[in-house]
Image (cartoon, rainbow, N blue to C red):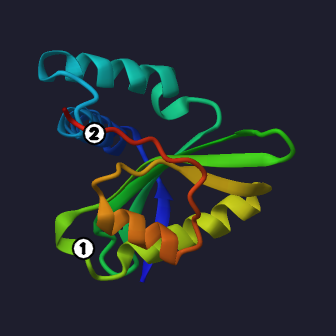
Amino acid sequence: MIKLVRMDEPTFQFFLKQSTRDYAEDKVRIGAWEQDTAMQLSRDEMNRYLPKGLHTEGAFLYSIVEDTGNTQAGYIWFNVAQGRQDKEAFIYDFYIFEPYQQKGYGSMALTLLDEEARSMGVTRIGLHVFGDNDRAFKLYQKLGYGITDITMSKKL
């Protein structure tokens, strides 16, 4: 039903723009960043984790594509690095476009990611989920992701 396809440069530029904007908005929404500096901070993070863009060593950027029609349904970005014991992956961004949400695309994409990561010798996949993203949290739990730590705050 879907497949993971390595991004080309035009797709990467679209992803970079959307991902940078979304990350800035998420950080403002949860109160971690101020609105007036959020876009610059988000660009700084992207440059830190993708210093050579699409050609950053250890970074894997995929479009999530429908098998029929080759329509892009979303994207996923993860990096692979040597962990304490084995190769580990970390999902930096994962997004299913609105028309494809609530239709199983997220589960299918993460299952394909598992297969791709295994083929690379990865033995562990990590990710971050914002505390107010209950839908994503439930999806990750359903697919076997467990909590490794929790950071909490309250507004006074």
Between residue 56 and residue 90, name the one nearer to us. 90
Asked whether disc 1 touches disc 2, contact meaning CB atoms under 8 Å apart, the reply is: no
Snapshot quadrant of residue 99: bottom left
Q: As shown in the figure, which amino acid type bears the numbered disc 2?
A: Lys
Question: Helix, strand or loop at disc 1?
Answer: helix
* Gap between marks 1 and 2 measured at Cα: 34 Å
Furthest residue in direction front, as rendered: 156
| Quadrant, the C terminus | top left
| Quadrant, the N terminus | bottom left
Question: Helix, strand or loop at disc 2?
Answer: loop
Between residue 57 and residue 155, name the one nearer to us. 155
Lower position in the chain sequence, tag 1 or tag 2: 1
Counting from the top left corner in percent of width and height, residue 51 is at: 50, 20
Between residue 28 and residue 67, name the one nearer to us. 28
Which label lies toward us, 1 or 2?
Answer: 2
What numbered label is drawn on residue 154?
A: 2
Question: Does 89 appear above or below 34?
Answer: below
Q: Is residue 101 visible?
A: yes
At horizontal 18% and vertical 39% (from top left) the residue drawn is 29
Q: As shown in the figure, which amino acid type bears the numbered disc 1?
A: Tyr
Q: Which residue is mark 1?
A: 100
At horizontal 40% and vertical 64% (from top left) the residue drawn is 137
